[in-house]
Image: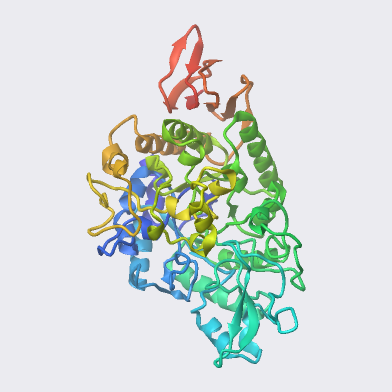
Amino acid sequence: MTQDLAPLVQDPSAGRSTGWWRSAVIYQVYVRSFADSDGDGVGDLRGARDRLPHLADLGVDAVWLTPFYASPQADGGYDVADYRAVDPLFGELSDADGLVREAHRLGLRVIVDIVPNHTSDQHAWFRAALADRHGGPARERYHFRPGRGESGQWPPNDWESVFGGPAWTRTAGADGAPGEWYLHLFAPEQPDLNWDHPEVAREFASVLRFWLDLGVDGFRVDVAHGMVKAAGLPDIGRGEQAKMIGTQVLPFFDQDGVHEIHRSWRRLLDSYDGERIGVAEAWAPTSERLALYVRPDELHQAFNFQFLRCPWGAAAMREVIDESLAATAAVGAPATWVLSNHDVVRHTTRYGGGERGLRRARAAALLMLALPGSAYVYQGEELGLPEVEDLPDEARQDPAFLRGRGARARGGVPHGNEGAERSGQDGTRDGCRVPIPWSGSTAPYGFGPGTSWLPQPAQWRELSVEAQSGDPRSTLELYRSALALRRELPGLGDGPMSWLPAPEGVLALSRPGFVCTLNTLATEAELPVPGRPVLATAPLEFGGGAVRVPAEACVWWAV
């Protein structure tokens, strides 16, 4: 295995075409919560660089970094004021360069976030737009509109912010007189760009080149389904629009025009050596529409949120897997699987929490890593971290919480206890962003020399990297073993898959030389022994040519 990886260790960006992303396991680093080098309680690029050996030891192929650009941090860095500068909170440009170089030395590729749907309200363009009160060219880069009503007192249409409330904010002149409204599908500090303006496309092409020249291996495109709005900005005609995202095409999301933007970016990526990639964070109502983002001339991957949102159960999981594989196969792209990220409740908690949630989360991880294509691991997932659901109100920083949804939750709906509350987009995203534990028995558990920007639970001392390392029963060692086997066994990663007969409540899939069995039932299941067990989430019992797979457990077999 070491010999096979040697060229990659020397330079992940060099060499012949490999299609590395088709089988890659990519680890998401939420920078502010990964590792803090300077003691201010916030993770930074130097801290992330120092912890890269953990990722190399874990066995992932690449790291995806959330935004570290200059930003007022109104939405955790997804409000970018300067796309070519590192925010002092996270370090300097030299720190980004050093992280990329060290990652490449360790055989890891680096993907960074790009945020093209909106800028910060502190971006030079938007400051110029506000100063241009007479509707001049500076405002054409954004969506400024007069309001409705006799005095323009009502928003231009009925669109709602994903974070709650209207998607429009009214401007005021130097004399305080009310003026036009501007569109922001997220926080008011995140005005939406107008991608019909050619200067916007030119600017982002330049930004992509800047980071590609620095050596990054690709981009995760934030809100890749955004950017293009329906002509005339028509009303939707109903409220609770955030619940409609991913269920239907909306006049502000998943418009067909976004695909020409992604085609232009694919041409730019292909002009660089080293197989640089684009990854779409795209919410689409069907697997078929999601597959449009990964056609041969568009982006390389798209997050499979249908799989993330799938409830626990063999029938539901099989349906989503079949739909996903069929849709991506139709366009020649790999499927991309994900269970958690920085915007959703951690799947250990989504699957029920406690021992049962962890049991299911471990089994789901083995299923995900056995499926054809690429997989993403969110930081702390390899530790089995649960959602932190009891954060004090004064500690929370999610803009959706601050805009009132959290206040409603405080009025009687415990966080994470009802369907809508499980999404994370309702003001509860802080719970999955709590800094991860590395070592020690007291907070911040090796996160840094100071405190941590969100408080960590006392029980996390038992879940740290240090506490779990070397324990064969730990979730960390389960992930390490699975990722090592994924590289060693030739049938894993991208490639064919077929279903095998299995009892109700059990999934059995076959890959070349490999079988994965998942028991989703609350009771053990007895199955014929398909081969030699190489990894399991729980102890197995054998007898008479059969194996008894424990409740909510997954097993890998070499055949």
Q: Is residue 328 left or right of residue 85?
A: right
**Tally of numbered tags:** 0
**Front-most of residues 131 and 545:** 131
Q: Position of residue 265 (x, y in %)?
A: 61, 67
Q: Position of residue 123 (x, y in %)?
A: 50, 79
Which image quadrant for residue 190? bottom right
Q: Is residue 390 left or right of residue 242?
A: left
Vertical position of residue 29 compared to residue 144: above or below: above
Determine the residue positioned at 43% across, 47% down: 389
Q: Residue furthest top?
A: 544
Vertical position of residue 334 compared to residue 319: above or below: below
Vertical position of residue 50 compared to residue 318: above or below: below
Quadrant of the drawing holding the N terminus: top left
**Front-most of residues 142 and 58:** 142
Answer whether residue 130 is visible to the viewer in this image. Answer: yes
Q: Residue furthest front?
A: 411
Which image quadrant for residue 319? top right
Q: How is the image coloured?
A: rainbow
Q: Position of residue 189 (x, y in %)?
A: 52, 73
Determine the residue positioned at 60% across, 53% down: 302
Q: Is residue 309 left or right of residue 250?
A: left
Q: Position of residue 307 (x, y in %)?
A: 59, 42
Vertical position of residue 408 compared to residue 96: above or below: above
**Front-most of residues 403 and 331:** 403
Answer whether residue 296 is visible to the viewer in this image. Answer: no
